[in-house]
Amino acid sequence: MATENVANAAAHSGPTQGEYIVHHLTHLNSTGEAQKSIVDWSVINLDSFVFSTALGIITVLLLWFVASRATAGVPGRLQAAIEVLVEMVADQAKGIIHDAKSRLFVAPLALTVFVWIFFMNAMDLLPLDVLPKLWEGYYAASGHDPHHAYLRIVPSADLNITLAMALGVLSVCIYYNIKIKGIGGWVHELFAAPFGSHPVLAPINFLMQMIEFAAKTISHGMRLFGNMYAGELVFMLIALMGAAWAGTHSLSGGLLFAGHVIAGSIWAIFHILIITLQAFIFMMLTLVYVGQAHESH
Amino acid sequence: MNLNATLFAQLIVFFILVWFTMKFVWPPITKALDDRAKKIADGLAAAERGKHELELASKRSAEVVREGKEKSADVLATAEKRAVQIIEDAKAQAKVEADRIVAAARADVEQEVVRAREQLRDQVAALAVAGAEKILRKEINAGAHADILVAIKQGL
């Protein structure tokens, strides 16, 4: 597909390799143009929002479909599969969060996060150019400039999505900090930990705490984003390798095509591990951070 | 990696989905799991109980078989005793009957003897009368000497 795309594009003064990648890394947002500034709250990425919400709805509907038919008798395969997930999450939550009442909220949160992120990451395994190409065709057919038909289909390769989930986890952590320790207790902890309760140490303690919260949240969101973004980029580079063959008819061209097939397969197979692992890591960190919110220093 | 309002939209979706899962997904599945665990535990307990009951039942059945054997041996012994008894009784009865028959026969015989003797007596008397008649026909009237004949007859 990348081959096709670049070849087609080459036919009418198409994109260079750089343009191809930039095009693929530009979100379809509410302005229709690539976002200029780093932060602009008036813009919304339609592609990420639509795909992530749709996948989220698929996630909860799938889980709900199984849950509403769950029997204590002999489970079907789908039920057994979901039960494996639920038990895995429940076990992890039990090991990390010792408050049974908190687990009623945190364990479902972890399950949602895991399955949802898994589905969002799995979008990376769809052929790179299929959906963008279809979108380009539709965009052109509806009378727009196909060069502006941007579409990114992996929501977890959008920092907004991953950081939003990390911030969601942060707000849950703050909620439990206040709920378990009381507002006074938590504020006291902010100034008394980690170096001890002393007026001189209070600002340092507070600074450390703020850094800790910021570091936890940003690394939480960035880790997933970085992995998926890099994965997506590698797929693009592999696609470009195949695309380079399109212009040539030499032996090296043939090798490039073979390289595309082999590297693409290897990376996709490896990516099955990555998408699952990243979803699992995100879920585990969610549990660990919420668990830390339960502990007093 | 630009930040924009997608972040807030995602944050809201995130909490809606978590709420949904907490409300409608987690409880039924964990309930099914707990129920199944309980069912399995109950099943194992029932199996254990069944095994125990089987043991008891086999013990009880062995007891019953033993009792039955004893009882049948008793019955057999009693029956044998009874059979012997019956045979003994029958023998005794037969002996009594035989004695009775023998006695009756003896009585009959004696009666017959008495009757024969009676007849014999009559016939001897008649014979004597006849003899005497023959003797006396010549010299005596039977009618005139009837009292003598009766006296003779009585003397026999």
Image (cartoon, rainbow, N blue to C red):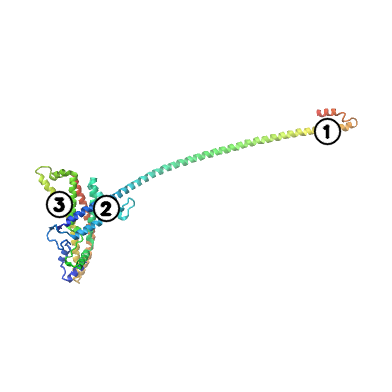
Please name the amino acid that badge 1 sits on.
Answer: Ala
**Residue closer to the observer: A4 or A155:** A155
Quick one: which residue is furthest to the left in this view?
A200
Residue at x 32%, y 54% (from the top left corner): A76
Is residue A231 or residue B5 the one in the foreground? B5
Residue identifier under label 1:
B126
* Residue at 20%, 47% in the rendered image: A291
Callouts 3 and 2 on one subunit: yes
Local SS, label 1: helix
Q: Residue A21 at x, y = what percent?
A: 16, 64
Q: Is residue B138 above or below residue B19?
A: above
Q: Residue furthest right?
A: B138
Q: Earlier in the sequence, mark 3 or mark 2?
A: 2
| SS state under label 2 | helix
Is residue A297 in sight in this rendering?
A: no
Q: Label 1, label 2: how many angstroms apart (C-alpha)? A: 142 Å
Q: Position of residue B67 (x, y in %)?
A: 48, 39
Crowding around mark 3 (Cα neighbors within 10 Å: few <14, some 14 to 19, many 20+) is few
State the residue in front, B44 or A175.
A175
Q: Quadrant of the C terminus of chain A?
A: top left
Disc number placed over residue A85 in the picture, else none? 2
Q: Nearer the viewer, mark 1 or mark 2?
A: 2
Q: Secondary structure at mark 3?
A: helix
Going by the numbered disc 2, the residue's amino acid type is Leu
Q: Which mark is residue A215?
A: 3
Q: Is residue A167 visible?
A: yes
Q: Position of residue A218 (x, y in %)?
A: 15, 53
Q: Outermost residue, front direction?
A: A142
Corner quadrant of residue A184: top left
Same subunit, labels 1 and 2: the answer reads no
